[in-house]
Image: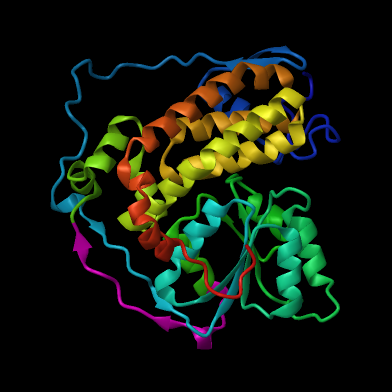
Amino acid sequence: MGRLFESFERLDEVKNRNIEGTGLGMSITTRLLSLMGSELEVASTYGEGSVFSFDLWQKIENPLPLGDFRPLPGKDADIEAYRESFRAFEAHILVVDDTRMNLMVVTNLLKKTEIQIDTAPGGEEAIELTGKNAYDVILLDQRMPKMDGVEVLQKIREQENGRNADTPVICLTADAINGARERYMGEGFTDYLTKPVDGQALENMLQRYLPKEKIISVLPELKIASEETRVAADPMLSALSEAGIDVEKGLSFCGNNRDIYQTVLREYLQSSGEKREKLQEYYDRRDWENYMILVHSLKSTSATIGAKELSGLSSILENAASQKNESIITRNHGDAMELYEKLSALLSGFPELVSEEEEEEEEEILEFPAGDVN
């Protein structure tokens, strides 16, 4: 407790080696509170949890209500219609992620750029592909079973043929914290992208690292109606929004493309049964290593469709599993499983997500280019 608020202090380095951070958060927090005439109080039981609290005295300048501060839909609420910012049909990239839905999102976001895309569901498949092909860019998930991203990166760099010894490798991670870019670059990555992957951020990253001679710029698209208006006019999207799903956020992760979003929802639903069974199995066996990997995936995929509550619960479980903190896992596992089951039941109520008649059309949307490993 005495070291808790000191700068650059990280406690139990060996036990918490997978926990990220610089050790500055607590120190900065106490300084900010001190500037506001307050202090941070802590009540903690080792191995069970901690409660941090503070009091702030604020002066009320005017007791009158501010009024409705929410912006009304109109011209100012219009958004940019998604359109690829470049094309690069001569470029060849590899996307590595153990979650099929994440592969789908990236490949569909880049579909109109005409980039040649290979995909791999794990480290072994990625190493096999990099032994055969020279890529312009590699997008590599950091947290995967068997081999994590750092291990895969090292093996790719050490391959005898050297086809990808200098290829830019972008780390895909759900860890969006200050200092993450520097940390991953220190481990050998060229740069990093946070998950869920934002379409514009993805394109910006590729334009930064793809060979300039392979990039053809595209003019921006005109504006379309606001997402609020669009969601209200769509029965499925409206129902999801009323159920607490952040549909606008989900659409944004799919390039504001309704068809891609529907495909992602379908994949989320189809994989939910097996995932729930596996999560329960790992929980019952107290296999916290595999439990952590699976809830990490659930955190990312739930955020992608806009299921913020389940994504947040999954984040808590992931952190607890990384520390093997059974107390926190036990308190939150049941709620997460119940929420996951309710969400799956909600999605299964939409015919467009379960109808066999649309499978052929959907397969065209999520189709991976030839030559990949799946």
Which residue is the extreme one toward the left?
74
The quadrant of the rendering that contains the N terminus is top right
Q: Quadrant of the C terminus?
A: bottom right
Among the 4 quarters of the image, the one containing residue 287: top right
Residue at the (52%, 88%) spot, across then down: 213
Q: Which of 296 and 100 is in front in this view?
A: 100
User: Which residue is nearer to you in this view: 224 or 286?
Assistant: 286
Residue drawn at (46%, 46%) of the image = 304
Q: Position of residue 200 (x, y in %)?
A: 42, 62
In the rendered picture of this protein, how many numbered marks are placed on residues?
Answer: 0
Q: Quadrant of residue 361?
A: bottom left
- Determine whether 99 is above or below 18 in the image: below
Q: Position of residue 194 (x, y in %)?
A: 55, 52
The location of residue 363, given as percent across then percent down, is 43, 61
State whether residue 85 appears in this view.
yes
Residue numbers of the magenta segment: 208-224
Q: Residue at x 54, y 44 (%)?
A: 300
Check the image and report above or below for 292 versus 113.
above
Q: Residue furthest bottom?
A: 213
Q: Is residue 58 left or right of residue 230?
A: right
Direction from residue 352 to residue 230 in the image, left or right: left
Left or right of 146? Residue 222 is: left
Colour mapping used in the image: rainbow
Residue visible at 80% across and 39% down in the picture? 17
How far across and how far down the image is residue 28, in percent? 62, 33
